[in-house]
Image (spheres, helix red, strand yellow):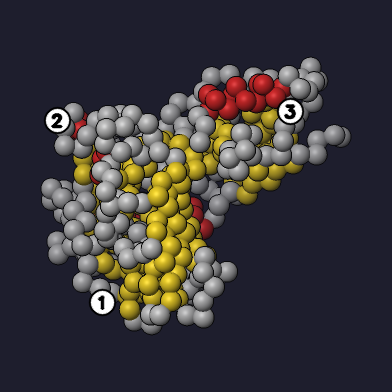
Amino acid sequence: MKSISTWIAVVVLLASCGDTKDDQPIFSVVITNATEDTVKSFGFDVNLPAIDSSFHLVTGNVPVDFQLEDRNENEIPDKLHGSIDLLPTSRYTIIARPGEIGSTPAKRSQVISRLIGSSEDINRYEYTDQDQWMLDGIVMENDVNTYRFLMRAPFAVDLIGKRTSDLILPDVMLVSDEIDQWGGDILAEQQSLGLGSPALCLVDEIYNLASFDSKEVVVAARGPLRSEVEIVTRGVPVRDEKIDVRQTWQLEAGKPWAEVSLEILTQTNLTLQFAFGIQKHEDATAFTQGKQGVMHFAYTWGPQSSEGDLLGMAVMVRDQYEIDNFLADPHNSFYLAAPLNNKVEYRVMYHWSGDPLAVTDEVQFINIVKDHARQYAQQPVVEVDFDLSD
């Protein structure tokens, strides 16, 4: 996976093969926010064809931050992820104009995926229980929250609490004194799956993804505006079958939530549901459920961090799926969702009393969850046009 600075070089190099003198716009993106909400750092994607010139994005005369990604790994950017603030009931036209991109956006999202003793991040990894990870796993972070994919059973999704919007340096270990000023591990996951880590459910039995034939990790994006980690777990035993599952986690700059996509890759006659939820804690509220428009949400709240600080965790999923719950597990409270076309999407989020927002009240936290559930249900509309010949 190339950095944004590398892709600037790639796109500028391609410009030498084309005519960049013409100021004809290359493509446009129209974003309509029909809601009454101000949307900060709204992330939008554009699937790119081969473009033979460098370009930058503007709305009016205001530059728009973006990053380029090579999802096909063919040395040519094929996806653009941009970020823009949207006012209520507003419409923005973003134009891609020829010319150098200019300054790189500030780094607000990253992935740290290093083995102990290595100075290089890993983009592709096949799991072995012999490896030891810096930070005890793969860390996906933005300027609000940090999620850690533990590389050991039961492969929980752990949470790291930030006291600052600064990003952690790759060589800072969580056990060091330096981490105290930045934040620290806030979730004692123990035997739970943490927050949002998926499992499979068949009838009334949960099958987590800790038993498998192989596990592969791909870091598809490293920021500066959006990070993405894909984990494919193959050969999960369910009854007499082996099931392959893909989970994809995205974390955009400025967002307290991570977006999760799950997919069953195996053809099967089993009636499987995806299970995902929140770990149980004796000092926290029960798995409290609600609905905001078309969005189901559930949360817990209380002094459930590893140090007894106040911590709220939440899950949000659309009602397009057949939704149920499974609360009998001793370590986790689960939503159950029947896949559509083998897929399920949901979001997870958290806040704790030590973060810059200083969420110290359950009512404050649930109002934040409801706000994000409402915005999740009413996304701004993005339209892309590559035919600007008129």
Q: Reading the chain from its start, which is encountered first: label 1 or label 2?
A: 2
Residue labelled with disc 2: 177
Where's residue 291, x and y in %? 42, 66
Residue at 20% over, 62% down: 191
Residue labelled with disc 3: 52
Q: Quadrant of the C terminus?
A: top right
Q: Is residue 230 above or below residue 171?
A: below
The residue tagged with tag 2: helix, strand or loop? Answer: loop
Q: Reading the chain from its start, which is encountered first: label 3 or label 1?
A: 3
Residue labelled with disc 1: 328
Where's residue 319, x and y in %? 49, 69
Q: Is residue 314 above or below residue 110?
A: below
Distance from disc 1 to disc 2, alpha carbons, whole Å, reads 39 Å
Amino acid at circle 2 = Asp
Q: Are marks 2 and 3 in contact (CB under 8 Å)?
A: no
Residue at 44% over, 57% down: 232
Residue at 36% over, 64% down: 212
The answer to whether residue 132 of the structure is visible from this angle is: yes
Judge the density around disc 2: few (<14), some (14-19), many (≥20) Cα neighbours within 10 Å. few
Residue at 37% over, 31% down: 120
Where's residue 153, x and y in %? 26, 58
Q: Is residue 341 above or below residue 141?
A: below
